[in-house]
Amino acid sequence: MLNYAIKRIGLAALILITVMLAMYAMVFLVPGDPASLALGPRATPELKAQLIERMGLDQPIHVQVANFFSNALRGDLGYDVWSKRPVLEQILEVFPNTLFLGAMALGWALVCGIALGCLAVVWRGTAIDTVLGILSVSMISVPSFVIALYSLLIFSVWLGWLPAIGAGEPGDWGSQLRAVILPAFAIGITWVGYLARLVRASMLEVMGANHIRTARAFGLPESRIVTRYALRLAIIPTIAILAVGFGSILSSAVFVETVFSRPGIGTLITSAVAKRNYPVVMGTVLFMTAFYLLVVTAADLLIARLDPRVRDVFRG
Amino acid sequence: MSSVADPAPVARAPRSAGALWHLLRDPMGAMGLVLVLAFLAMALFAPWLAPYDPLKLDVMNKLQPPSLSHWAGTDQLGRDTLSRLIWGARTALGIALTATGIAGAIGLVLGLIAGYGPRWLDAVLVLILDSLSSLPMIMFALAVITVVGPGTGTLILVIVLVSIPGYARLIRAQTLTLAASDFILAERTMGASAPRILFRHLLPNVVGPLVIVLSMDIPVVIMLEAGLSYLNLGVKPPTPSWGNILYDGYTSLRQQPSLVIAAGIPLILATIGFTFLGEGLRDALDPKLQVRPR
């Protein structure tokens, strides 16, 4: 286990370093220097020189790369071109909002997805199963930001039940909860579909297994067999897909946060992209990549802990 | 991928007539095929299908509700929404098909090289591909847009770059399984050259799964195009794209909700259609293929 953990973490670190190098190289691949790119048509020679110095672009390239790495390791992701605030400070300010949104979206998706998956298994082969199957695929394919726009129109503009913009008042849990409902609904719906299918497929795989047959022979009701014994075996693939799916949740969050003008990682980075605010874009990308690697690695370790076969595959 | 060297489920492409029949008998697949053909027709024949010029302004009739002369109403500049949505199909499908096509071709070559080339090259390629695919897709896309600047060309570049790793990894895995199989071993003992093995034997056998994955990725790509255009980081207005029409609808949500409602419908139908078709193709051709969420 320890051996596996070390290898897995080492791989994540190697990937992170490659990503950082790639991000850094990207800036130099394009014609023009980042300073004039950031300043755009407003660039005057003085302003440019000032920015170049502040960004450290006047130093030799190996010094720049070394600085970039040592700064990033110390948590210094540079400064906003316009507001001159530290990038990390801005990220940490809005990150909890995105995390909360993602957690709420996944929370309701897990509950509904697992329930639908179990229903499909209980009624496998019937019309209900077919309808649930079509419903899950439809939920997977509907773009979350269209759901966001439609639910904004129905529940905020027409019915006026829920707020249309923002993330609620800081410190006021009630308003924060009300503000998260619609965006979490929009992001989660895709995941209800994924999870329902995944749970159904992995449970059907084990329905013929010996311990299920034994449970049946003991005369346990089908619903109890499904929820008690078969569902357990669906846990590992669910953890795996949730970790991999983090990227797709983040994509949805970027669009959905914009629809609801909700402060978060998505609104931070999209406004920075529009203004070509390099340090903010690069810092956010790096931060989210590191976070993503952390999640995926943790999930892999958890899976290896739950399922010894995974460790063996890696060893062999 | 199982470690058992059994190429049968990946290798044999069923006769296409049988596969088509299988697809049509499956209600989901048939529905997907009909929707996809409808959108393809819409994209191809947009100039003849659209009742108005999608760019023609008519500010006197701005933000009209649906009526007999404008079936889907008009936008904030008085342009006919139905015509813009029909032309939007051309934008969406044009970008999606071009980008997935390019990415598929590059992924195919890289995957074959990694799977059948020298070991050190494989290790380097795998590290690069793994690093690329461990960037959350949207973050990578936004980083590229920041550097290159938004536009239709950038959008295609972004989609190609974020898609290549998945395709290359798929092809690599398939190639590795096939390369260890008996019929390739037999070819090699008979002295077949590497190009012959690559192009005559490996290539035809790995294309099938790639086509399925490509078709299942098209809805994701359509969504990404619409999403980025919604953020004004994709297709530039006034060129109609479902995404920027949705944005126009969002800005006039309180005066005229019909615009946002109308603009969402083709996007939902197109993504559902392509997903159903992709699922149907997968079931008909290669039911064991695993597709991860993106």
Image (tube, coloured by chain):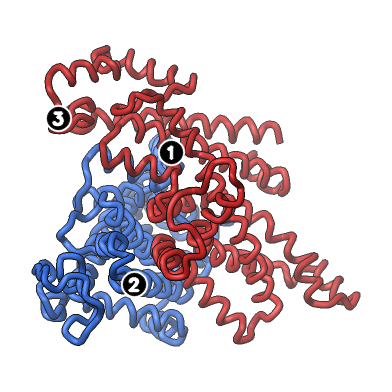
Q: Residue at x 16, y 84 (%)?
A: B69
Question: Under tag 3, what secondary structure?
Answer: helix
Considering the image in quadrants, where does the N terminus of chain A appear? top right
Q: Is residue B179 visible?
A: no
Number of marks in the image? 3
Residue receiving disc 3 = A42
What subunit carries mark 3? A
Q: Can you give x and y, in whole percent of width and height, for residue A301 in the image?
A: 65, 40
Determine which residue is flagged by label 1.
Answer: B131
Looking at the image, residue B64 sits to the left or right of residue B8; the answer is: left
Q: Which of marks 1 and 2 precedes in the sequence?
A: 1
Q: Is residue B197 visible?
A: yes
Above or below: residue A190 compared with residue B151: below
**Residue assigned mark 2:** B261
Label 2 crowd bin: few (<14), some (14–19), many (20+), radius 10 Å: some
Q: Residue at x 68, y 71 (%)?
A: A118
Residue B49 lies, in percent from the top left, at 15, 81
| Three-letter code, disc 3 | Arg
The three-letter amino acid code for the residue at tag 2 is: Ile
Rate crowding at label 3 as few (under 14), some (14 to 19) or many (20 or more) other CA atoms within 10 Å.
Answer: few
- Rendering coords of residue B22 (x, y %): 44, 83
Lateral position of residue B232 relative to residue B20, left or right: left
In terms of secondary structure, where does tag 2 sit? helix
